[in-house]
Image (tube, rainbow, N blue to C red):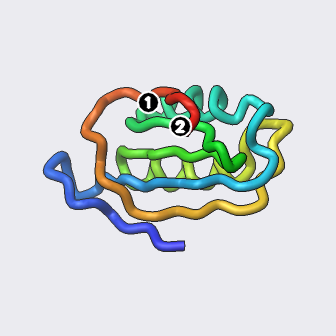
Amino acid sequence: MTETTSQNPAGPDRKAVLVRIHGKVQGVWYRAWTVERATQAGLAGWVRNRADGTVEALFAGPAGDVDRMVEACRRGPEHAIVRDIAVEPARDPGTAVFEKRPTL
């Protein structure tokens, strides 16, 4: 797992990562949980289901908050069974909101 701080004029502590969550993560309120948690943390980005059964999310914000969100995703909501998470650096979306997107 590789995580790096993105180059962003908003500050050197800002980070963006793309996360792919594997396991029993669809049909268990994972996206709604992610929107709620990321919004509470003040993160920007999005979350969506993928046709292969995974959930994909982009988190952007202060590095510590992004890292805490990634760690929370390792557990997920109550009925999720997270088997693996892949994390890679991403381009900061530059938005101030976190949204649920349609399945890809």
Amino acid at dot 2: Val
Residue 26 occupies quadrant: top right
Q: Position of residue 65 (x, y in %)?
A: 46, 47
Q: Position of residue 55 (x, y in %)?
A: 63, 45
**Counting other residues with Cα less than 10 Å from the Cα at mark 1, is it few (<14), some (14-19), or many (20 or more)?**
many
Location of mark 1 (residue): 98
Marks 2,1: beta carbons within 8 A: yes
Location of mark 2 (residue): 47
- The CA span between labels 2 and 1 is 8 Å
Instruction: Spot the residue most to the left.
Output: 9
Disc 2, SS: strand
Disc 1, SS: strand
Q: Residue at x 42, y 32 (%)?
A: 42
Q: Nearer the viewer, mark 2 or mark 1?
A: 2
Sequence-first tag of 2 and 1: 2
Pick the front one: 88 or 5: 88
